[in-house]
Amino acid sequence: MFSQFGPILDIVALKTQKGRGQAFIVFRDTITASNAMRELQDFVFFDKPLNIHYAKTTSDIVAKMEGTFQSKEKRAQEALEAEEKKRKAIGNLEEEPNAKRVAGKLPQGQSQPDVDEMALRQIPPNKTLFVQNLPLECTDNMLAALFRKYPGFVEVRIPPGQKGVAFVDYVNEIQAGVAMGQLQGLRIANDHPMIISFQKLRTE
């Protein structure tokens, strides 16, 4: 029935009680799958109308053809790692003020930079990070090499005429929080641990 629209690469029928009556039909391309879905939607099959949707994930056989295949174990591990990073980032924001975390990383006898701790705590999470205490010779390329390691990185911006500070943009506040949690207090120079907070949002 489905083969009239193009070659079928695979058919996976669910055998669980919950998945009974469901199956995945894998075509070579999206256009073929779309044609089949359009033509057979609500088609009466064994006295019941077919309810057809796109699958939420790419099938293993297509992923292998595209060179993007990952085993279920690897996908599960990556999902766990991503969730752990998310929990860590959110937990750090809730449990410790940014400046206090930096102070814990400074060597004994070395004072932390002058930062308004209460002000940092009151800034709501957003997609832009404000980075302070940078060496004067630090460039946007140097910072981009650090921050682009984390998902969602967009760009680094050093304000014209200003030294020692920068803004780092991410796609969303969760990704920005992950980067902040991982790079907080990192030393670009011996006496310059980075102090990272969310950008203070402008109020009308």
Image: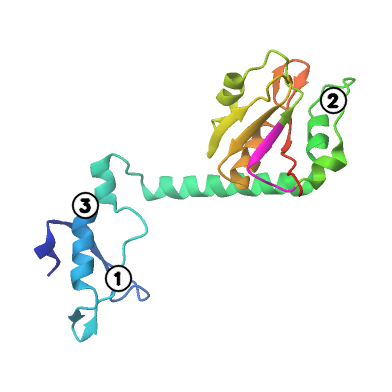
SS at mark 2 in the image: loop
Checking the image for residue 129, the label placed there is none
Q: CA distance from mark 3 to mark 2?
A: 57 Å
137 sits left or right of 43 in the view: right
SS at mark 1 in the image: loop
Name the quadrant containing residue 183: top right
Number of the front mark, 1 or 2: 2
Q: Name the residue type under label 3.
A: Asp
**Which of the two discs, 3 and 2, labels the residue nearer the N terminus?**
3
Residue 20 in the image: x percent, y percent?
31, 76
Q: Name the residue type under label 1.
A: Lys
Q: In terms of depth relative to the viewer, which is nearer, 88 or 193?
A: 193
Residue 197 in the image: x percent, y percent?
73, 37
Residue 23 in the image: x percent, y percent?
26, 68
Q: CA distance from mark 1 to mark 3?
A: 26 Å
Q: In terms of depth relative to the viewer, which is nearer, 108 or 174?
A: 174
Q: Name the residue type under label 2.
A: Pro
Residue 168 in the image: x percent, y percent?
63, 33
Identify whether 170 is placed above or below 16.
Answer: above
**Which of the two discs, 1 and 2, labels the residue nearer the N terminus?**
1
Q: Which residue is located at x 18 percent, y 70 percent?
A: 39
Furthest residue toward bottom = 47
Task: Give the magenta-colored segment's residue range.
Answer: 124-130
SS at mark 3 in the image: loop
Checking the image for residue 15, the label placed there is 1
Checking the image for residue 29, the label placed there is 3
Identify whether 38 is placed above or below 197.
Answer: below
Name the quadrant containing residue 16: bottom left
Residue corresponding to mark 2:
113
The answer, for residue 150, to whether it is visible in the render is no
